[in-house]
Amino acid sequence: MAVDVIEQMAKAIHKVRLHKNVGLTSTWRDYVDEARAAYEALEQTKGKSRYSIDDYDPAAHEPI
C-alpha cells in the first residue's frame, strides 16, 4: 500500500516539475526519495487533530 502511494506521489512531483521546467530530463523514479519523505511526514500526522500539529494556538485564531 505505502509503496503504491509513494510511487503515485513521485509521479505527481515529476509531473509538476516537468510542467514547470519543460527541458527536464529526469524520470519519476528520481523523486522517490522526496515522495517517501513527504509520505513519512504525512504518516506522522495521522490520527492527530489539526490543533495538536506543531504549535498551533487556537486562541490566536478565534474571531474578534
Image: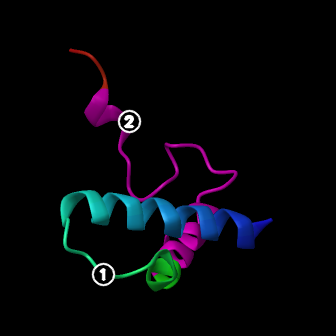
Extreme residue in the right direction = 1
Instruction: Report x, y in % for residue 4.
Output: 72, 66
Q: Is 40 covered by the magenta stretch?
A: yes
Q: Nearer the viewer, residue 27 or 2?
A: 27
What scheme was used to colour the molecule? rainbow
Residue 39, picture quadrant? bottom right
Which image quarter is the C terminus in? top left
Q: Earlier in the sequence, mark 2 or mark 1?
A: 1
Q: Is 27 covered by the magenta stretch?
A: no
Does residue 39 lie above or below 16 as drawn? below
Q: Which residue is mark 2?
A: 58
Q: Residue at x 26, y 57 (%)?
A: 19
Determine contact: label 2, label 1, CB under 8 Å. no
Extreme residue in the top direction = 64
Residue type at numbered disc 2:
Pro
Crowding at dot 2, Cα within 10 Å, few <14 / some 14-19 / many 20+, comes out as few
Q: Residue at x 20, y 65 (%)?
A: 22
Closest to the camera, between mark 2 and mark 1, is 1
SS for callout 1: loop
Q: Residue at x 19, y 66 (%)?
A: 21
SS for callout 2: helix
Region in magenta: 34-61
Instruction: Report x, y in % for residue 45.
Output: 59, 58
Residue type at numbered disc 1:
Thr
Q: Which residue is mark 1?
A: 25
